[in-house]
Amino acid sequence: MTKDGSGKGDKKAQQYGVTPQSTDFNDWYNEVVKKADLADNSPVAGAMVVRPYGSALWENIVRWLDDRFKATGHESLVFPTLIPMGFITKEADHVEGFAPELFTVSKIGTEVLSEPYVMRPTSETIIGHMWSGWLNSYRDLPFLHYQWGSVFRAELRTKAFLRTSEFFWHEGHTAHADEPEARAEVRQMLDIYHEFCRDVLALPVVRGEKTASERFAGAVATYSIEGMMRDGKALQSGTSHYLGQNFSKAFDVKFQTREQKEEYAHTTSWAISSRIIGAIIMTHGDDFGLIMPPRIAPIQVVIIPVGRKDNFDAMVQEGDALAAELRAQGLRVKVDKRDGVTNGFKYNDWELKGIPVRIELGPRDLEQGVVVVKSRNTDEKETLQRSEAVAGMTTRLDTIHDWLLNRATTYMREHTLEADTYEAFQAAIEAGNWVRAYHCGDAVCEKSIKDDTKATTRNVPLDDAEFFSEPGEGSCVKCGQPSAYGKRVIFGRQY
Amino acid sequence: MTKDGSGKGDKKAQQYGVTPQSTDFNDWYNEVVKKADLADNSPVAGAMVVRPYGSALWENIVRWLDDRFKATGHESLVFPTLIPMGFITKEADHVEGFAPELFTVSKIGTEVLSEPYVMRPTSETIIGHMWSGWLNSYRDLPFLHYQWGSVFRAELRTKAFLRTSEFFWHEGHTAHADEPEARAEVRQMLDIYHEFCRDVLALPVVRGEKTASERFAGAVATYSIEGMMRDGKALQSGTSHYLGQNFSKAFDVKFQTREQKEEYAHTTSWAISSRIIGAIIMTHGDDFGLIMPPRIAPIQVVIIPVGRKDNFDAMVQEGDALAAELRAQGLRVKVDKRDGVTNGFKYNDWELKGIPVRIELGPRDLEQGVVVVKSRNTDEKETLQRSEAVAGMTTRLDTIHDWLLNRATTYMREHTLEADTYEAFQAAIEAGNWVRAYHCGDAVCEKSIKDDTKATTRNVPLDDAEFFSEPGEGSCVKCGQPSAYGKRVIFGRQY
């Protein structure tokens, strides 16, 4: 399959050495991650090494989100990587959820510890403990905290960015005087995630509430954004939890109210992790490799000086000058100055890495005051006046953003089917779609669907979820009981 | 002791509840860290919680250094937090240096590991392992890598920022084709650290080479920057190591040279950690609390609306307007809108937190178009035209920077004495000074000085070290043998 559907892609892709998506999506993913220099395997079971190109992408993600968190009044903190084992067991659901995945530290230097530590799988417990000491009065609230860091959860079958034993994230943690304020925070952060995905990463995602059996361990309500990958599977791309008073009761996070009464705080937590990079790869990539959404791309424009030996240096100089003009517009630009490789190799290399725009700079073009411009999402090269190429670059990047978002949205809509019989449900899942179906809300029934089809409930779209939020009533697609959610639930296989 | 030496400080400091430096420097430090909301103790032995004010300071440090690393061509990566135990033992000196401090992970989920992991004390080993796979030809070099993250080294007696079992840092790691290029890198990074300390943190530091017994475990040469705290002790504030081929041989980091021969890479590593925050506190602080160097301060200017109940809201609005004018100059400004506390409490609170400039905004001043401005390093309040206060703010902050740097430089010079007899040496150390003395270079002799006085060699200043670099020859201050370094060595007690 190719960008324009011409079939030409298969041959080109083979030359570049990436398995086509249609042949084996999993191989395609692993090859792209490695060949685009995003990440590599490590000698530590389940952990990856993020290489400079992947790290630069993650840094851009961190910066955008971090700015947004600060703009909405949140403050960063740094809590220890280790947590006393006893903390994890204090919240009953929490320990049940995380115990099988814990990394245990039982020796420091030569000292064997009587109470071991665990490497944090998430930090609700230790943060609850600290808050307990910091919180006195309603005047201290809200606590609007977050931290960036690594977390550790054992994974048997790992896959770069998507499922690694060590992964990177922010975890937001807030405490409020009452439930409505806490719930408003949960919703605010979900909406920020949605905005980030749509407007920065060009990822369409469905905002909704998780069913009870898919909730975070210890939460009263869990909300998620769900995206569809190009193999039809879902990727939960961010979560926001209302924790009620579960953790504040377990860790004694209480305060004196305005009316001089003692009350437990209402807490929330929310996160986006490095798996969002997996979503970028699997939503936008094609048989030629990655396509980086322009607003987050570490390199937005690559300039290739095309010259022979005797004028290559002059072309490189021209490339630097052009790069300076583009950078003056705030763009991230690279000039490929490698002299040991062919132009064709360079083109393929940067296509694989998904650079949104390539500019070729040749001596003859230069004489005529033109450059050759190619957007990553088309096969066409355009010859433009140099000044026109510079002036139009931001618009061009926006166009690529829109193209990516539209393509992904169309794909998601086309691969989301309604089913009112279990046969239709199973067939649609088997064919690699999401299914919108009525469900009774019973956890046992939900589990039986999962056992049959490997599909789980993704979420129940919010009323203003942008996608799939139409109200409706019907019979459970599996058991025939009345539907529980006032609308269809999204089912799908997931990463 | 007070800012102007008037003795007034003691009383004021007691009111604010901070032990004066002269009474107990250690208590002063611990109280300032806690009361200024920089950090708190954690339930994890040896680890701290960095609170929002400390975290904002660290983020500013990270951003400045990170920009500089990128500007000098370095790329960030992310390596796993865990390292296979077997890696640590591959470089003989390295394992000897770190074995007593290691955090060992021997269980994941319910699985007991046959080969345990350690939480990284530093990452030379795993990075060497990865490089070995990435490096083929001289064309691949140099590798100019760094990562930000936590490292773990068991500490028995801990102290926030200065000595914690988990601390935060960048670790730079580079690989080069030959020794001169590697040594130039080592020097470049030392100079960047020096520039950062002097021009951003207002910290005078001495660039020099460590003696053999103070080298990093596995290094051929270690360079450091050393600063003097206000109790006369030294703080090693950054290090840059030339590792020769030690790690590349242990981890098989080799490449084909231009001449088609196989050669091991020459590697370097360098770091500044969160202990630099300890240096800021202990170099600039006084009996009133912190003094934040203006160029790194999370809040550079605090505006206190001074009003009674009926006009407080109007003053707050004025404060926001003034803040907007200052922010338009790129300044970091906070308006203190708390209404449950007195103005006096606010003044003390922000003095304790070391905000470089305070502006008081009262209704009568406002009628006259003036504001009251107070710099943290003086006791004087100035009444200035509002426009004048705004226009002069950047210069005012620069003046505070210079004042801090000069004060610290004077202090360091006054408390660095030359000694040519061992009696004079011991007396000078005991009185809380650094000592410049000739030394024979013998490790046993050096150790005997440490055993006698708790003073160690800080470094041998470089020829262009800015401080204490005069060449000279003499007899070892301890054993009388000829001096080994062509100049005096700096000795001091250290953090």
Image: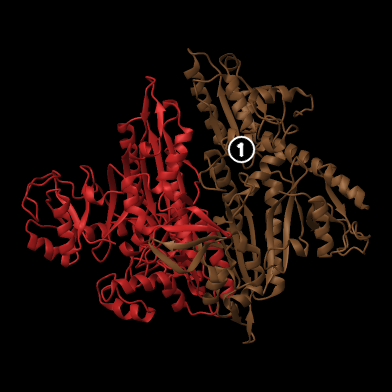
Chain colours: A red, B brown
Q: Is residue B301 above or below residue B199?
A: above
Task: Report which quarter residue B447 is drawn in.
Answer: bottom right
**In terms of depth relative to the viewer, which is nearer, A380 or A43?**
A43
- Can residue A298 be seen in this snapshot? no
Q: Position of residue B463 (x, y in %)?
A: 83, 59
Q: Is residue B278 above or below residue B184?
A: above
- Can residue B470 be seen in this snapshot? yes
Q: Residue at x 41, y 66 (%)?
A: A46
Task: Report which quarter residue A26 is drawn in.
Answer: bottom left
Judge the density around disc 1: few (<14), some (14-19), many (≥20) Cα neighbours within 10 Å: many
Q: Position of residue B41 (x, y in %)?
A: 55, 41
* Apparent side of residue B458 relative to residue B479 in the rendered image (left or right): left
Q: Residue furthest front?
A: A114
**In terms of depth relative to the viewer, which is nearer, A393 or B213?**
B213
Quadrant of the image containing the N terminus of chain A: bottom left
**In terms of depth relative to the viewer, which is nearer, A382 or B383?**
B383
How many numbered circles does the render carry? Answer: 1
* Apparent side of residue A5 relative to residue B7 in the rendered image (left or right): left
**Label 1 chain ID:** B
Q: Secondary structure at mark 1?
A: helix
Quadrant of the image containing the C terminus of chain A: bottom left
Q: Position of residue B407 (x, y in %)?
A: 77, 38
Disc 1 target residue: B33
Q: Position of residue A163 (x, y in %)?
A: 36, 62
Disc 1 marks a residue whose amino acid type is Val
Q: Residue at x 74, y 37 (%)?
A: B403
Q: Residue at x 65, y 22 (%)?
A: B15
Task: Report which quarter residue B239 is drawn in.
Answer: bottom right
